[in-house]
Image (cartoon, rainbow, N blue to C red):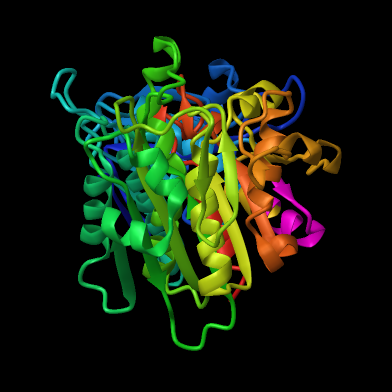
């Protein structure tokens, strides 16, 4: 992974990156004042170049200027927009891609560098991310970035936090990108165990099929019943001394989704290795909370199952008894995510009794129909909780939009033979799925948030700090939010 260091000037690098910002409509970009300015000759040359480059200063614009025989030998001008954290993150990701053939670069940042440094570090680490099972195409040459600041020691904690956030996001991307030929529930649980090993302050319990059966996790067992790879329930607990708030994070963990007997068409099935992105995000966020030492107790529940077609698969019309006793009628085995989440949420409410609960799930295609590919749908009855989480998600550079928990649609959940109908085919798909999950929140109903993040969990193209493939959506927003709860 890319190495990032904080250094103090003066420095004479081979490749120097200078940030630029918009000056105004129709005007060329201007250099951003930095804590350690470049030499007068370099600054004068860069200022003279700007009108000819046609740079506007928008975040992500990059221009290279060669200086044969000079030091630095290569001068890069980088647009950072208005200079907020988001602009620096987008700019850094663009720089990581543009400078992939360099081996070492140096970049200067402003004196008040906390937001700039956080965005810069995250953008570099996320924009340079690649997941490959083959060496075809090679790997980027860029290995080291020096960031010139006035006081490296004072800013070291900011860089460390940004690095941890990016590392956890990369972990979630790795888990989500892994092909399902490798990634079954047992494998996923083993990855969590490996990531948590060596930390006495992290507690892990993994329930297998026998324990799930003995304790009544009927939804997880039903969904995982058609696979040769049995289901699991991962429970990972970060319990720092003195924590006053306990948050439970629940993440949907379907390691591959054929749709079951209600089988998906091939185009809809080919990317279903991403159907555990919610579980990846909440696991990574909990590991990140521990790494950052956040003073809030976090328990993650990741119900893991492979939804396959076989003689032991659950059938449309089956009645499922969930943890705690509620029953649901399912007439569509492709609406499986809510069944495993229901078990985990009911367990959290009855046994863990947290202060707050948030679930992340690649739950419905209706999310993308409503909000497109880059926004998650957020549901909550608590205005303050919704606003706090939305604010953290936005500040972290992710996107979500609050949607209504419309009680008009509760009647859709009615079943003649069970407590609930889990998959009514009457429209409002994302809203109805959220209303189904609400039935399992008990007295946490007004302290619960559901996030349907199917669409933004995967990117079809390069955009900002996102690369093609898994995005790790939710890790950054959750860590930013958890940091406010101490």
Q: Residue at x 21, y 30 (%)?
A: 181
- Quarter of the rendering containing residue 402: top right
Location of residue 221 in the rendering, given as x and y in whole percent from the top left corner: 38, 47
Q: Residue at x 75, y 34 (%)?
A: 412
Location of residue 317 in the rendering, given as x and y in whole percent from the top left corner: 54, 30
Q: Quadrant of the N terminus?
A: top left
Location of residue 23 in the rendering, given as x and y in whole percent from the top left corner: 71, 32
Q: Is residue 385 magenta?
A: yes
Side of 42 where 210 appears, left or right: left
Side of 237 where 119 appears, left or right: right
Q: Is residue 393 above or below residue 67?
A: below
Location of residue 66 in the rendering, given as x and y in whole percent from the top left corner: 34, 23
Give the magenta part as a residue range.
Answer: 379-390
Q: Give whichever of 408, 160 is nearer the camera.
A: 408
Assign the magenta stretch its main secondary structure: helix
Q: Residue at x 61, y 72 (%)?
A: 485
Q: Is residue 185 above or below residue 177?
A: below
Side of 192 where 107 appears, left or right: right
Q: Residue at x 26, y 37 (%)?
A: 14
Residue found farthest to the front = 417
Q: Quadrant of the C terminus?
A: bottom right
Q: Give whichever of 35, 362 is nearer the camera.
A: 362
Residue 449 visible here: yes
Q: Is residue 23 above or below residue 442?
A: above
Q: Give whichever of 176, 168 is nearer the camera.
A: 176
């Amino acid at each position: 992974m890319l190495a990032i260091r904080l250094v103090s000037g003066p420095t004479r690098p081979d490749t120097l990156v200078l940030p630029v910002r918009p000056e105004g409509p129709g005007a060329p970009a201007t250099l951003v004042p930095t804590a350690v300015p470049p030499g007068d000759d370099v600054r004068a040359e860069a200022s003279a170049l700007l009108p000819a480059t046609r740079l506007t200063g928008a975040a992500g614009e990059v221009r290279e200027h060669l200086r044969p025989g000079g030091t630095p030998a290569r001068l890069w001008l980088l647009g950072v927009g208005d200079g907020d954290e988001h602009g620096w993150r987008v700019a850094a990701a663009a720089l990581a891609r543009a400078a992939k053939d360099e081996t070492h670069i140096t970049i200067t940042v402003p004196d008040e560098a906390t937001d700039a440094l956080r965005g810069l570090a995250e953008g570099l680490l996320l924009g340079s991310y690649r997941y490959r099972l083959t060496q075809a195409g090679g790997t980027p040459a860029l290995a080291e970035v020096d960031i010139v600041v006035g006081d490296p020691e004072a800013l070291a904690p900011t860089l460390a936090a940004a690095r941890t956030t990016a590392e956890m996001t990369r972990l979630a991307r790795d888990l989500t990108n892994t092909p399902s030929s490798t990634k079954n529930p047992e494998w996923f649980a083993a990855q969590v165990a490996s990531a948590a090993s060596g930390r006495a302050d992290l507690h892990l319990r993994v329930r297998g099929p026998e324990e799930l059966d003995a304790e009544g996790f009927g939804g997880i067992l039903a969904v995982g019943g058609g696979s040769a790879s049995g289901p699991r329930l991962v429970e990972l607990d970060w319990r720092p001394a003195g924590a006053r708030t306990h948050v439970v994070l629940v993440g949907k963990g379907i390691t591959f989704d054929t749709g079951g007997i209600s089988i998906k068409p091939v185009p809809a099935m080919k990317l279903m290795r991403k159907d555990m992105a919610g579980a990846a995000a909440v696991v990574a966020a909990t590991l990140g909370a521990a790494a950052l030492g956040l003073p809030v107790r976090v328990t993650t529940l990741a119900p893991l199952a492979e939804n396959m077609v076989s003689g032991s698969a659950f059938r449309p019309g089956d009645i499922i008894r969930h943890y705690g006793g509620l029953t649901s009628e399912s007439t569509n085995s492709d609406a499986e995510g809510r069944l495993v989440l229901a078990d985990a949420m009911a367990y959290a409410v009855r046994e863990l009794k947290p202060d707050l609960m948030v679930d992340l799930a690649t739950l419905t295609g209706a999310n993308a129909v409503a909000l497109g590919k880059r926004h998650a749908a957020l549901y909550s009855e608590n205005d303050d909780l919704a606003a706090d989480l939305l604010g953290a998600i936005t500040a972290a550079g992710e996107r979500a939009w609050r949607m209504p928990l419309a009680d008009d649609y509760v009647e859709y959940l009615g079943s003649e033979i069970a407590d609930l109908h889990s998959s009514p085919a009457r429209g409002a798909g994302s809203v109805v799925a959220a209303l189904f999950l609400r039935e399992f929140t008990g007295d946490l109903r007004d302290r619960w948030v559901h996030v349907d993040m199917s669409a933004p969990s995967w990117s079809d193209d390069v955009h900002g700090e996102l690369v093609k493939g898994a995005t790790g959506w939710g890790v950054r927003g959750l860590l930013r939010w958890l940091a406010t709860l101490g």
